[in-house]
Image (cartoon, rainbow, N blue to C red):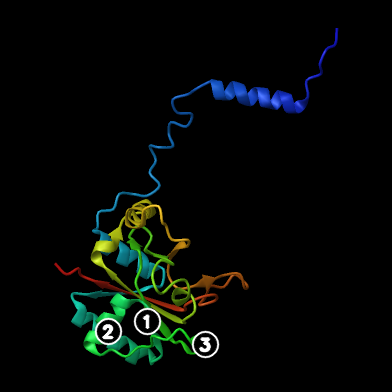
Amino acid sequence: MNIRNTTAKEKMLKKIRQALLQKKENPHPMFEENQLYKDEEDSLDVTFAREFTQMSGNFIYCDGEINLIENLIILVEKINISKIYIWEKPIQQMMDQFGFPYRKSQQALEEIEASITGCEALIARNGSIMVSNASESGRRLSVYPPVHIVIARASQLVMDVKHAMAQIKERYGDDLPTMITTITGPSRTADIEKRLVLGAHGPKQLYLFLLEDRF
């Protein structure tokens, strides 16, 4: 009679099969009772502004488009920039309405000083901006310029990443953008001597202009 030797691998697989057959209601009963985040008492806009500014973002609230243009003029004069690129048509139309100067060209990007883009959603929980390559801005205008200015509306505020992804799935259906990412403050690194450096591989300054929706 041949006795088949049981290998260590077979023993391990047998244990795994037995463990899968032994169903438990919850092997870690304390896990779900402890929340990853505390419940927020503040509104979405206040929560976002708090978290965004803590990550070195610059938050500007605008009660209308005129106020937004006024704040933009103050900003460009303050940081002394003029080569501002905008590729998204809705933002171009807004700027044209008030005569705000910008560049439409997709050439000479080495001259770019700032970009103005929209976004997919604002994630209040961690003060992040969700962007994708579905807009005319693509990937480049959120990465190339030293100053990135984002215009968003209050209706784009959500609490968590899962809510932002739900909005994107509802907006695009099965034709999801090939690039979806979040921006949490200006580009940063601490790889060099463990010292935090802003603008290492992307914009050094990030501004969020939150615009109230028009009804």
Instruction: Give the amino acid type for the residue marked by disc 1 in the picture.
Output: Ile
Q: Quadrant of the N terminus?
A: top right
Q: CA distance from mark 2 to mark 1?
A: 9 Å
Question: Could you tell me if residue 25 is visible in this image?
Answer: yes
Q: Residue furthest left?
A: 215
- Circle 2 is placed at which residue position? 95
Q: CA distance from mark 3 to mark 1?
A: 15 Å
Q: Residue furthest right?
A: 1
Question: Could you tell me if residue 70 is visible in this image?
Answer: no
- Circle 3 is placed at which residue position? 110
Secondary structure state at the residue bearing disc 3: helix
Instruction: Give the amino acid type for the residue marked by disc 3 in the picture.
Output: Glu
Mark 2 or mark 3: whose residue is earlier in sequence: 2
Which percent across, then down, holds residue 28? 47, 32
Q: CA distance from mark 2 to mark 3?
A: 23 Å
Q: Residue furthest front?
A: 175
Front one among 17 and 34: 17
- Circle 1 is placed at which residue position? 86
Labels 3 & 1 near each other (Cβ < 8 A): no
Residue depicted at 43% across the width and 61% down the height: 177
Mark 2 or mark 1: whose residue is earlier in sequence: 1
Which percent across, then down, holds residue 34? 39, 40
Front one among 214 and 32: 214
Q: Is residue 5 above or below residue 29?
A: above
